[in-house]
Amino acid sequence: MDASAFEKLSYGVYIIASGCSDEKNAFVATTAFQVTSEPLQIAVACNKNNFTRTFIEIFKKFSVSVLKQDYTPSILGNFGYRTGRGVNKFDGIHYKLGPHTSVPIVLDDAVAWFECKLVNSIDVGSHILFIGEVMDADTLTDDTPLTYTYYREVKKGKAPKNAPHGVAAPKDEEPKFEKPLTNNIKSSTMKSYECSVCGYVYNPAEGDPDNGIAPGTPFEELPDDWTCPLCGVPKSDFEVKND
Ligand code: FE
């Protein structure tokens, strides 16, 4: 089988939320799609280990927010690369409650949203396919919606571990180094730093070639505008990794 064929499938990038005003959670999904027009229904694939799964099963409703192409990276870091267990992902997030079901709907960086009542759940193995009847929907802006292809090929993003598809991480391109290599002895004593949002580890010996950071660059010498290549948060969200 040619696994790269899966990379030719098209996806969007969505925030799926569920719960109520007091208890809520949300995750980033690439598989949300309209399945019928009569009735109006949308299906969402949710990993069985996903914390939001429980919310959808208990509250029997969910919302779909369509992200814009020019999204704020931290919104994916917040909703896509960490669990909501013990964390309120909605802190500092602009959202509202759906007019029909009171389901939370994320508005930040969204071009449109759908409010859905859960009408069916199908066990499809690693994931559950939740099917919702659309109770309401709205368009917020005319911005271009984000596609998974754009996220992967232009933003160099990687799929969250609970993503349903078998798309491989982007292949390394020719490195574009802004800094000369330093010696290996120095790099072996430099500390690794871990992103507190998504868990990405910056290894100074490896650098971040996709973003012009040469192997051997200490974390402390990264440009101030360098951000986590996985979720996009700034350097200030990194902590020393103690092995
Ligand atoms: Fe990160």
Image (cartoon, grey):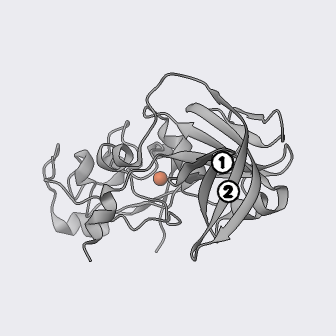
- Amino acid at the residue labelled 2: Ile
Residue 175 vs 64, above or below: the answer is: below
* Closer to the camera in the image, 74 or 147: 147
Q: Are marks 1 and 2 in contact (CB under 8 Å)?
A: yes
- Amino acid at the residue labelled 1: Gln
Tell me which residue sits at (61%, 54%) in the image.
43
Residue 146, image x and y in percent?
Answer: 44, 39
The residue sitting at the right extreme is 22
The disc at residue 60 is none
Q: Residue 60, located in which quarter of the rendered image?
A: bottom right
Residue 178, image x and y in percent?
Answer: 17, 43
Neighbour tally class for label 2: few under 14, some 14-19, many 20 plus, Cα within 10 Å: many
SS for callout 2 = strand
Cα distance between the residues tagged 1 and 2 = 7 Å
Q: Residue 113, located in which quarter of the rendered image?
A: top right
Question: What residue is pinned by disc 1?
Answer: 41
Question: What residue is pinned by disc 2?
Answer: 131
Rendered-image quadrant of the N terminus: bottom left
